[in-house]
Amino acid sequence: MTDLIDMLATILSLILFGRIIVSWMVALGRLSPYSPIAKTLFDLTEPFLAPIRNLLPQTAGFDLSPLIAFIIIQILRTLLIQMVA
């Protein structure tokens, strides 16, 4: 069970990392926000990031919600593994 929790946390982290890279590419004009990969990553991550983003103050154009999401994923991963082990 701990392997499953670890695998899910890793997959979520990789999806978030992909979102960060794609959002930079979109911001730099290298990728369309309507491309299939951008749309898929945004659709997968937005339900998780939007509530976090709403709780954070605006920070000069920087979106810190993915960083907070990474921290939440790691905390949940650790707590769940400790509960199961």
Image: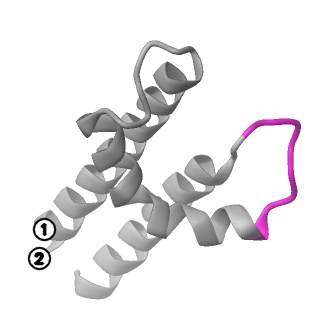
Name the residue: 23% across, 85% down: 84
Name the residue: 22% across, 62% down: 8
**Residue 1: which numbered mark, if any?**
2
Residue identified by numbered label 1:
4
Q: Is residue 47 above or below residue 60?
A: below
* Residue 6 forms part of the magenta stretch: no
Left/right placement of residue 44 relative to residue 5 reads: right
Q: Give the magenta part as a residue range.
A: 55-62
7 and 30: which one is in front?
30
The kind of residue tagged 2 is: Met
The kind of residue tagged 1 is: Leu
Name the residue: 50% across, 25% down: 26
Dominant secondary structure, magenta: loop
Left/right placement of residue 52 relative to residue 24 reads: right
68 and 74: which one is in front?
68
**Residue 47: which numbered mark, if any?**
none
Q: Quadrant of residue 61?
A: top right
Name the residue: 22% across, 69% down: 5
Residue 51 image position (x, y, % from top left): 62, 72
Residue 10 image position (x, y, % from top left): 27, 51
- Sort mark 2 into few (<14), some (14-19) or many (20+) by Cα contacts within 10 Å: few
Residue 72 image position (x, y, % from top left): 53, 65
CA–CA distance in space, label 2 to label 1 = 5 Å
Contact (Cβ within 8 Å) of mark 2 with mark 1? yes
Tell me the SS state at disc 1: helix
Left/right placement of residue 60 relative to residue 61 reads: right
Which residue lies most toward the bottom here?
83
Q: How is the protein colored in the picture? A: one colour
Q: In which quarter of the image is residue 83?
A: bottom left
Q: In this view, does 2 lie above or below 69?
A: below
* Residue 56 forms part of the magenta stretch: yes
